[in-house]
Every structure is written in structure tokens, then in C-alpha cells.
Amino acid sequence: MDHIYKNIHGYSDNLIAAYENFIKNNNKSHLKIVEVGVYLGRSASYLAVELYNKNISFDLHLVDNNWDKIGRKEFYSSQHQSRFEKIMWLYDRVVNVDEEGRLMVAVSRKLMYFDKKEDFANVRKENFKFIDEVTQNFKYFSDKVIFHQMDSKETSEKFDDNSVDLICLDANHEYESISADIKYWYPKLKYGGWIIGDDYCDQRGNGVKKAVIENFKDFWLIDNNGTIQKGDEKLSNGAWFLQKN
């Protein structure tokens, strides 16, 4: 199955590298997985397709209490190739290209417009519900993906301790929130299982870094190139991960 994650709006290259590293080290034929903080499912889509292609069966639980929000897509057809390339470079974190080669902007946390709309033709806008979009992104895995549109604590109470093979925490990055998520979910992880989180140090502060250092003595960092380093307070890039033992 071809990957579609690059067509899904999101910021998850470090997580994708972390998932790739997990799969490389996995020796199980079936996995129970939880991702907390899914948005539209970019990283989870990569994981689902990659596991499917490697004939690894899985149950993927996606947890997010923000799927009731409304977003907007805007489609453009480029008239000037040079302008098209420039815009793709300037807005590479918010722009995707659809199957027909049109620019697509997924508007979520803030509105994003191009400076010169006259450079484009056939502008089309459409609103979408996040839950509808994320469901569509996993339409080929309806028997493997379970959606939990509720908060992290409430969902964690549905899982037995020591029952999950892989947990990814990528919801609210404030210190109090990520600390609480670790408290809720780490007991659910099997011994030998992996826990992963993104944005060890993001632009909004050091909440993730502080929570990880306080809760775990030993952990690792991986960047979007797949480079792995032992985690410590001085480093500030990548997704964090560790194996429970």
C-alpha cells in the first residue's frame, strides 16, 4: 500500500522517524498501539501503512478531544511555476499538493493566506470537520483503528495496566499536561513496550523536556533524519522515546 501521510496536514517528521525506529526493532506479529494527540493523523497514517506493508497486525487507538473543531481547505491552481516553487518553499509547513497538483492549505490553528492571490486561479474553499477528515484518512483501516474522541485521562481508564505495546504522547505540550499524560499512560505500557513523544523542546517552552527528565532517568532522542542520541537536559531537538524495563 502506498503511503498517504505526506498529503495529510501536520508536523510529525520526528515522530515518523521514531515510529520507523520502533518498527525496525519490533519482533512481534501483533501490536496494541495508542496515540494521544492525533490532529488529522499524519504520523499515525505512516505507522498504519508501514505495519500493514510489513504484515504486522495491529489495533491502533487514536485519542483526541479536539476533533469537533472545524477547519478549512483552500485549493489553488498555479499559473506561474516560479511563483509556485517559491510559495512551496516559503510555506512548506502548511502547504500540501493534492493529486491534481493543486496547492492545498489546511487551515486549523490560524488562518494562512498567500500575499498575492491574483497569482492563482480557480480558488476553491471548503470547510471540514476534523473528525470527518481523520476518519477519511484511515478509511482503509476501519477494522484496525479505534477512535476515542475524549480526553486522555478518561481514555486511559479503559486500558488495563501492562497491556499496550506502543504509546505515543503528542497532545498538549504544557508541562502540567504532558506530566499528567505520562502519569495516565505509562502504567498501561507493557514491560518491553515503547513510549514515544514529540517536541522534546518546542518553540513554546520546555514543558515536554522538563516532564520527561523528571519522569525518566534514561531516554533517547531521534530527529527527522533518524539520528539517535542519548537524551539529556542540554539537547533540544527531536522526538523522545524509551523502552520500559
Image: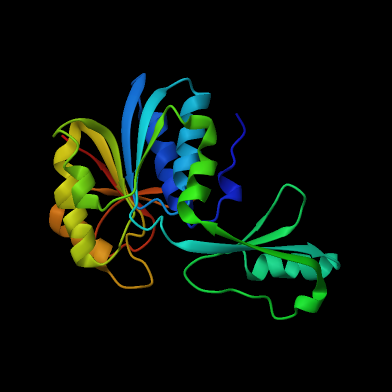
**Residue 244 coordinates in the image, percent (x, y):** 19, 37
As rendered, which of 169 and 228 lies closer to the eye?
A: 169
Colour scheme shown = rainbow
Asked if one can make out residue 233 in the rendered structure from this viewpoint, the answer is no
Residue shown at the point (36%, 59%) measured from the top left: 199
In the picture as drawn, the residue positioned furthest to the bottom comes out as 115
Q: Is residue 91 above or below residue 62?
A: below
The total number of labels drawn is 0
**Residue 20 coordinates in the image, percent (x, y):** 44, 38
Residue shown at the point (23%, 59%) measured from the top left: 178
Residue shown at the point (41%, 29%) measured from the top left: 144
Q: Is residue 124 above or below residue 168?
A: below
As rendered, which of 70 and 239 lies closer to the eye?
A: 70
Residue shown at the point (50%, 73%) measured from the top left: 110
**Residue 58 coordinates in the image, percent (x, y):** 38, 26
Asked if one can make out residue 142 in the rendered structure from this viewpoint, the answer is yes
